[in-house]
Each structure stands twice: as structure tokens, then as C-alpha cells.
Image (cartoon, coloured by chain):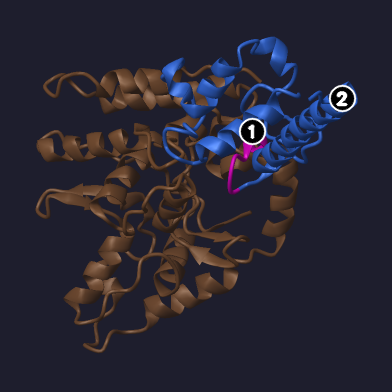
Chain colours: A blue, B brown
Amino acid sequence: MRMSYRAAGAALLALMLGTVQAADESVAAGKELAFSRAKGNCLACHYIDGGASPGNIAPPLMAMSVRFPERAKLRAQIWDATVTNPNTIMPPFGKHRILTEREIDQIVDFIMTL
Amino acid sequence: MKMTHILPLLLLAGSTLPAHAATDPQADIDKFQHYYLKTFSSVERSDFANGAYAIDPVGRENWEAIEEFPPYEPFIDEGRTMWETPFANGKSYADCFPDGPAQRQNYPHWDKEQGQVVTLALAINQCREANGEKPLKYKKGAIASLLAYMAYESRGQVTNVTLPEDDPRALAAYQAGKDFWLARRGQLNFSCAHCHAGYTGTQLRTETLSPAFGHTTGWPVYRAKWGELGTLHRRFGGCNKQVRAKAFPAQSEEYRNLEYFLTMMSNGLEFNGPSARK
């Protein structure tokens, strides 16, 4: 039997679109978490493009994929920033379970778009 | 804005020394006050008694407008009535405080006989209990009104908390207060010093982080957020909850020791309570 190239192509496209859609959803969820006072509340301290009344305690979140070429490093920074800087004021979002692992992934997805 | 974080580090360095190493409160006071005076070099020393409004010009404008018709005024009157009303046994607060209601400068202090820090709020309840009256709740209500009256009568007195040298327990209480102020706390992992020393003047969303130098001068406070008067220990509890830590009870040993340390750090500033805050 032979699957038509057309069918295979359609399937692949659907898969890719699905992945893109899932990624979009994660970015959107991450943005909501980052702006929410009860959850990430990144805006309390960081400027984020599009966020109202940001704080200025910490560096603005911009050009993040340049500043953090390694996604894992950014994630680790959110999970427990005291590892790289024992005196940091940044809450350890993963270590203290302020956010779930999944929520941290979503926030990283969002922040990497900035 | 780049902040120097030297103050928490300096104070921390002191508290990590072995217990037998000398703690020098006067050196702490000097370092503490120098940090704020240097960081906010255009602010007059005396102006730190006005809290965040010493360093936040926009907030200050609103605050000055509010002070034209002070929201705490009715509470001062209520406190005056309490002061003038005898207890059931015929005695009154004046029997406990023979020098009158202007007592602010005498508190908090180390009480050698009791072996603890005595705050004005604690002294008020000790007076009540000694006269057969029920103690008042410590966060708001009647005690806040009486404190407002006594603070009002004390306006202009200068903070001068001392550490008696003949009782090592006083130094231990001071050290406990200092350690509390420096310790990370709660799910958010902040110490008092993080926000109110290291990052003072920066903005948490739209809120300017207030300097700890002057944190003890204006109590009790009519806070718009509360819509009523509250005590210093009520605010301590609120701060602890904000970092998602369990608050200690008002007038607990922890908070009294913290008040002892924190008030001493503001030595030289005038008491100007009651006051209004956002």
C-alpha cells in the first residue's frame, strides 16, 4: 500500500499546527501566570512589555532569548535564584512551590518570547 | 535604579559571629542610619520620621492633603476619654503613668524585673489587669485609640531606646529582634531587610518600598487600606502574611523584640504618631 504524499503531508502539517497551537496556548497561559498577583506576579518587580504598573526592583524582562540562550538556565533561575545569588530577593518559585513545575514551564515559554 | 546592598550584608556579618563576640548596638545604629542618609542624600534626617513619604514625592502630596483633615482625629478623642475614665476600682491610667499620657519616649524598654521588653501597649494592658480590668486586644480598636491619644500627647519626643549594660538578657532580646529583621521568612523568602533596606525606594508594582529608618515613629496609624486605626504589631503581622509566612501574635516576644531593635535603629527621630498612611 502506499500512503499518498498528500495525505502524509496533511498529517505532518496537522501535527505541526497542533504543536504550534499547543506552544501558543502555553505562552498565553504563561503570560497570565506572569501577570497574576497571586501566582507568578513577575510584574511586581520586573518590567514586561504589555504589563500594567510594573515594579522596578529587578531587571526588565526583554531580549530573554539573547540573555538566556540556554532555556534550562532561565528555568533554573525561576526555580531557585538563590543558587546563583545567595542574596537575591527573587522568590524561589519552584523550590517553595509557589508555582507548579508545569506553571514554571509555561512562564518560561512566555518569557522566552520577550 | 541600582542599589547598594551593603547594609543587610554588614548587619548579617555581625549576626553570624559567634555568640561571645561583642554585639555593638550603637555601631549598628550608626551603620543603619548612615545607609539611608547616604542612599537618600537629599532627604533631611528628620524627614525619615515620615516613612515612605520622605522619599516618594507623589505619595507625599496626597498624604499632606489627607493630613489637612486627619482621619485619626476622632480616635485621639476616644483615647482621651479612655484616659480620663476611671476603672471600676476608681483608679485610672494616670495611676499607672503618674507622669501623664505623654509616655511615648519611655517605650519600648527593657524591664529588668520582668525580664522582657515592655512596649507601651503591653504596659497599658498590665495597668488594666493590675486594676482588675480585662486586657484589650492588641491590633486595633480601643487600644489603638488610647495609643493614639498617648502618641499625640507625646509628639515631638525623641526616640532614644537604650540598652542597659547590667543585664545580658537585654542584649539577647536586641539580638533576637535584629535576627528576626534579617531572617528570610515565608514562602516568598523575603527578610524585612530585603525590602526595607536593600531595595528601599524601588517600586513593588506601584508601591514605593519604605525605609526602615523611621518605621517606628508614627504609630498607631490610620491606614486607608484598613479604613481604621491599627497598631505597629498589626502591621508586623500583615507584613509577615504578605511574604506568606505565619504571623506571630501581636505583643508576642518575637514582635516585642523586633520593636525593640527597630525602634532603637530610629534613635534620634521624633515620635509623630498617630499618622495616616495609604
Q: CA distance from mark 2 to mark 1?
A: 40 Å
Q: Is residue B168 visible?
A: yes
- Asked if B2 appears above or below B109 in the picture, the reply is above
Q: Residue at (75%, 47%) from the top-left corner?
A: B61
Residue B116 % position (x, y): 17, 50
Q: Which residue is mark 2?
A: A4
Residue B121: x percent and y percent? 33, 62
- Which residue in the protein does label 1 denote? A107
Viewer-proximal residue, B252 or B151?
B252
**Which amino acid lies under the numbered mark 2 shown in the image of this protein?**
Ser
In magenta stretch: residue B179:
no
| SS assignment at label 1 | helix
Mark 1 crowd level (few <14, some 14–19, many ≥20, 10 Å Cα): many
The quarter of the displayed image where residue B161 is located: top left
Q: Can marks 2 and 1 be said to lie on one chain?
A: yes
User: B111 left or right of A101?
Assistant: left
Asked whether residue B268 is in view, the answer is: no
Q: Amino acid at mark 1?
A: Ile
**Residue at (36, 36) in percent of width and height:** B181
Q: Main secondary structure of the magenta part?
A: loop
Q: Nearer the viewer, mark 2 or mark 1?
A: 2
N-terminal of the pair, mark 2 or mark 1, is 2
Vertical placement of residue B20 versus B175, above or below: above
Question: x%, y% of residue A23?
Answer: 73, 32
Quadrant of res B138: bottom left
What's drawn in magenta, residue-wise? A38-45
